Amino acid sequence: MPVAATELLSASTGLAPVWRPDARLLILGSLPGQASLNAAQYYAHPRNQFWPLLQALFAIDIQLAYADRLLALQQQQVALWDLIQSAKRPGSLDSAIDPASVRLNDFARLLTQLPQLQAVWLNGGTAYRHWQQLSRQLALPAGLQIHALPSTSPAHASQSFAQKLQQWQQAAAQLV
């Protein structure tokens, strides 16, 4: 009997969360792509628009070293993580994630450590779908804003940078 291709794949495991207890915003992606996993850096693909968007929103210089960008992000009271802890996926496309292999991160524990959290921004449709599944199991803080935003991935080219920026700016305008 032939073996399915996804059975031969080892699971990709995501990166550790980046946060401080004073975070007011949590940005969640789905699962880092291969370039990010290889570099052990969030949004490492050179065409990913995440860091340019954050530069426009929070004045985080994309020319800074990665560790310095993370520090600047935390100084802006922004936390960063992914919904998926691990999953089997050939390549980097979210559409290639094997749904049966998905293991979600422990958000119940993280949320208890973020007492000032006001908003969750979901970077792309896959993040939004997994958040919908996960949020039914969580005790979310009252008034927590949830924003489903267009993916910053280079694979999501149906919107221009300016269109994505406008939607991300609208979410940022709601932060207190």
Image (cartoon, grey):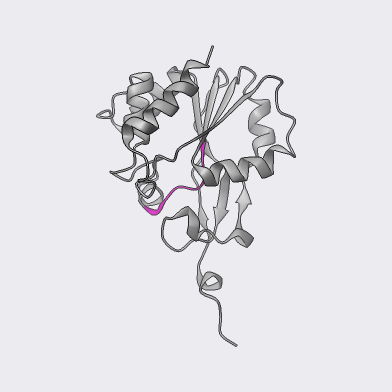
- x 56%, y 72%: residue: 7
Marks counted in the figure total 0
Give percent across and percent down for residue 73.
Answer: 42, 24
Whether residue 152 appears in magenta in the rendering, the answer is no
Check the image and report above or below for 35 versus 56: below
Describe residue 130's horizontal placement relative to residue 53 as left or right. right
Give percent across and percent down for residue 37.
Answer: 41, 50
Q: Quadrant where the N terminus lies?
A: bottom right
Q: Nearer the viewer, residue 145 or 17?
A: 145
- x 29%, y 31%: residue: 65
Q: Is residue 86 visible?
A: yes
Q: Nearer the viewer, residue 78 or 162?
A: 162
Quarter where residue 120 is shown: top right
Give percent across and percent down for residue 107.
Answer: 65, 36
Check the image and report above or below for 69 versus 91: above
**Residues shaded magenta:** 28-34
